[in-house]
Image (tube, rainbow, N blue to C red):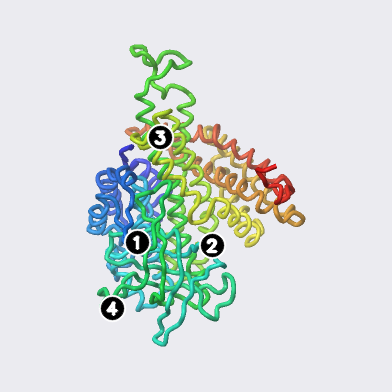
């Protein structure tokens, strides 16, 4: 298994030189505390924890997995001690209010910390990671009493949180939720039903688990308009925050999964469990999306996490493994063969991994700034600003989640391929990365669901294409600023053409949908992938612009090789990966009949 090394140079490059985090933090009401020394201390501390505590548990955790016995779940050896160190370090409360014991730092710092943790050990990251959305939901929609009762221990990390959405008969289509909430005279509710696929739904790391549960009131309207949200603790909580009796929430089993085996995925049975309404009745879906947006950005991080870890495993192997001679001549003449890194196809795979990890990281870090602005607007009570930032992030979310997880899986597969047959052997750890990466395209909404959300809701229904026009206008402004730069001119020209094409494709699909409604669905994944490649190209162009300017000015000569590498990877992305857009462009505008004309009864393997 690759030993994780936090890419601090690249992280600092994005934060300080490309996205100007210091200036960004100065615009936030809680940004003053995020000074250079504090940020550096957090980055170094997180790197140390991830490299020395979490990374060594990644492969052993996969091999041991979680164990289930009569409703109790035991995490792999070392996880409880690592979690205790996580709590002692105050890592869970990084971006939460001081009144609840947090450090009140911007949310982006928590996301960056989560990236390091997830790359080092994604299974471990899921235990505290699911709590973030739970806390955000309580903060935004809970009463003062609920906040005071639950937040301090959640912020400390001694309690954890989950989100209980999925049921045996429904996943994405939450209108089919059957879990019931019967009101009691004391204002509580009895929650009954079964929830499945609940990450960290049961474990031995925390004293209590606070479940956020979707359920229906007796008089609720049908469908998604009749869903309410409830707080259902594993142990009831007394007024002084001490633990009371066990709530009838039991773990029926845990799933036996392809990957992330050290993360417990539970079936939870609620048998008249005591619950507390959070938010307004029948408006739980709205509140739930606070959690889901957090979770989807977190899942997008998984795409770059696995790309980074797979690259860190593949690169040293490619430098050491000897096989055949390079076509351009001997590179290691004193040895029987050349290292495989000298073969162009191996370099293609390594560069693809690097382009995905570093390009995706810049996309995530920009989205993290939007999340900071949302949190700041919410804190200031500026509803209009909050909604504007929420809409802005809403455009990014399906692209980040759908596109980056698909590319993260591709990068993980390349890591196995670099190893050849050894990549298929467990002891090297590369196949674990591919298994762990596979779930990222599925949970929190599959790629198809993200694609339909992007084109159906965000582009066509809500904005009538305006969101694409606005975003491409931003890119074109960047292109105009760099059109006369000899080096950047080619990037600017490619992006300009793609922006025009993106708008044209949007209009074509919009017009075609008037007669062919299914084209929205049939074109959706190609539209999402096209959008993702263009967006990543824009972020690679930004990195290249900064790197080329640094080299031209003579600044940062001590890191000149880093800047040169940035430019080379940007070149690779534009020349070798960005052309993929044209296949997606051609496919998305074709009529849906090739998908819909085959009668359902003809989908058969028995003729």
For residue 238, the mark is: 4
Q: Secondary structure at mark 4?
A: loop
Q: Position of residue 114 (x, y in %)?
A: 36, 52
For residue 570, the mark is: none
Q: Which residue is mark 2?
A: 170
Q: Residue at x 48, y 16 (%)?
A: 327
Nearer to me, 162 or 16: 162
- Kindly report the distance in space between the C-alpha atoms of the residues bearing marks 4 and 1: 21 Å
From this viewpoint, is residue 316 visible?
yes
Q: Which of the two labelled residues, at mark 3 and mark 4, occupies the earlier sequence position?
A: 4
Quarter where residue 586 is shown: top right
Q: Which of the two labelled residues, at mark 2 and mark 1, occupies the earlier sequence position?
A: 2
- Kindly report the distance in space between the C-alpha atoms of the residues bearing marks 3 and 2: 49 Å
Q: Position of residue 61 (x, y in %)?
A: 31, 47
- Kindly report the distance in space between the C-alpha atoms of the residues bearing marks 3 and 4: 57 Å
Q: Which residue is mark 3?
A: 563
């Amino acid at each position: 298994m690759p030993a994780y090394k936090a890419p601090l140079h690249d992280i600092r490059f994005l934060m300080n030189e490309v996205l100007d985090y210091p200036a960004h933090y100065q615009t936030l009401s809680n940004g003053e505390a995020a000074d250079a020394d504090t940020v550096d201390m957090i980055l170094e501390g997180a790197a140390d924890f991830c490299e020395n505590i979490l990374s060594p548990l990644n492969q052993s955790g996969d091999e041991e997995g979680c164990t289930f016995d009569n409703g109790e779940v035991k995490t792999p050896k070392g996880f409880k001690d690592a979690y205790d160190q996580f709590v002692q370090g105050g890592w869970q409360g990084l971006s939460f209010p001081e009144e609840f014991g947090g450090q009140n730092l911007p949310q982006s710092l928590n996301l960056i910390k989560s990236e390091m943790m997830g790359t080092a050990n994604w299974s471990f990251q899921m235990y505290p990671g699911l709590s973030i959305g739970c806390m955000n939901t309580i903060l935004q929609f809970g009463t003062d009493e609920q906040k005071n009762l639950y937040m301090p221990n959640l912020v400390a990390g001694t309690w954890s949180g989950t989100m209980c959405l999925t049921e045996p008969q429904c996943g994405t289509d939450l209108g089919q939720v059957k879990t019931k909430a019967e009101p009691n005279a004391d204002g509580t509710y009895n929650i009954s039903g079964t929830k499945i696929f609940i990450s960290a739904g049961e474990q031995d790391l925390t004293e209590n688990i606070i479940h956020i549960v979707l359920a229906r009131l007796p008089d609720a309207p049908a469908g998604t308009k009749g869903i309410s949200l409830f707080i259902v603790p594993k142990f009831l909580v007394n007024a002084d925050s001490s633990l009371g009796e066990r709530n009838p929430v039991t773990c029926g089993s845990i799933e036996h999964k392809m990957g992330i085996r050290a993360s417990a995925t539970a079936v939870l049975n609620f048998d008249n469990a005591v619950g507390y309404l959070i938010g307004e009745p029948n408006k739980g879906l709205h509140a739930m999306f606070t959690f889901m947006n957090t979770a989807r950005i977190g899942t997008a991080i998984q795409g770059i996490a696995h790309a980074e870890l797979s690259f860190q495993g593949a690169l040293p192997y490619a430098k050491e493994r000897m096989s055949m001679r390079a076509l351009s001549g001997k590179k290691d003449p004193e040895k029987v063969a050349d290292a495989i890194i000298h073969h162009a196809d191996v370099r293609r795979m390594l560069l693809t991994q690097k382009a995905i990890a570093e390009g995706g990281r810049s996309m995530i870090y920009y989205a993290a700034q939007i999340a900071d602005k949302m949190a700041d607007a919410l804190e200031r009570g500026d509803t209009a600003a909050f909604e504007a930032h929420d809409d802005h992030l809403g455009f990014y979310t399906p692209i980040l989640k759908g596109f980056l997880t698909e590319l993260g899986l591709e990068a993980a597969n390349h890591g196995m391929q670099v190893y050849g047959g050894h990549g298929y052997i467990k002891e090297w750890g590369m196949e674990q990365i591919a298994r762990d990466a596979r779930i990222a395209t599925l949970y929190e909404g599959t790629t198809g669901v993200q694609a339909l959300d992007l084109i159906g809701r965000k582009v066509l229904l809500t904005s009538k294409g305006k969101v694409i026009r606005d975003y491409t206008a931003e890119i074109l402004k960047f292109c105009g600023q760099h059109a006369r730069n000899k080096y950047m001119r080619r990037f600017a020209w490619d992006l300009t053409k793609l922006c025009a094409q993106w708008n044209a494709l949007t209009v074509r699909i919009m017009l075609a949908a008037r007669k062919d409604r299914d084209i929205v669905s049939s074109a959706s994944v190609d539209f999402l992938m096209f959008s993702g490649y263009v967006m990543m190209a824009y972020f690679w162009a930004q990195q290249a612009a900064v790197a080329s300017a640094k080299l031209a000015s003579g600044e940062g000569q001590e890191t000149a090789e880093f800047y040169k590498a940035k430019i080379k990877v940007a070149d690779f992305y534009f020349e070798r990966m960005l052309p993929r857009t044209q296949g997606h462009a051609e496919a998305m505008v074709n009529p849906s009949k090739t998908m819909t004309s085959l009668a359902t009864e003809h989908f058969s393997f028995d003729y």
